[in-house]
Amino acid sequence: MLVGMGVLHGSGFTYVSDTLASSELPGFLKRVLPPLYLYPSVLMVILALVIVLALRQRNGQSFVLAVVAGIVAANAVLGFVLGGLLPGGVLLTVTALIGVAARQSARQT
């Protein structure tokens, strides 16, 4: 889900860049805002990779997954505030799934 959401969000990069380029914003903002838009997409893919790597480890899985769940939960709050129900809801679902994986991991060790 994280990779899919990251790819979906990243697919809007060209549109955002073109819109900003044709806007009346100062040049500094035209250069800074596109990479800032891309940040959540990259973060989601990296967090998905961290989850996969954590699930392959024998020790410390639950701690790493709990940290990642916290990061995704914080992003879910931002998703609700900035983007509405869809991004926030998807990220909260991902948080819950990571929490279940962390709990299962803790039970197996």
Image (spheres, rainbow, N blue to C red):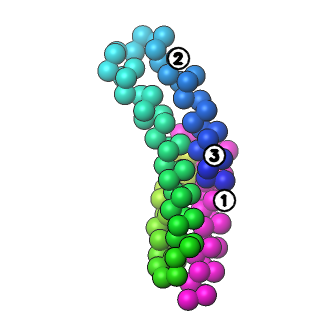
Secondary structure under the numbered disc 2 in the rendered image = helix
Q: Residue at x 37, y 28 (%)?
A: 32
Q: Earlier in the sequence, mark 3 or mark 2?
A: 3
Point out residue 1 in the picture as x, y percentages from the top left corner.
Answer: 66, 53
Q: Earlier in the sequence, mark 1 or mark 3?
A: 3
**Is disc 3 in contact with disc 2, using a CB cutoff of under 8 Å?**
no
Which amino acid, mark 1?
A: Thr
| Label 2 environment density (alpha carbons within 10 Å; few <14, some 14–19, many ≥20) | few
Check disc 3 and report the residue beneath it.
Answer: 5
Residue 97 sits inside the magenta stretch: yes
8 to 71, vertically: above or below: above
Q: Is residue 83 left or right of residue 35?
A: right
Which amino acid, mark 3?
A: Met
- Residue 19: assigned label: 2
Task: Name the chief secondary structure element in magenta.
Answer: helix
Residue range corresponding to the magenta coloring: 82-109
Q: Is residue 89 left or right of residue 70?
A: right
Quarter of the rendering containing residue 102: bottom right
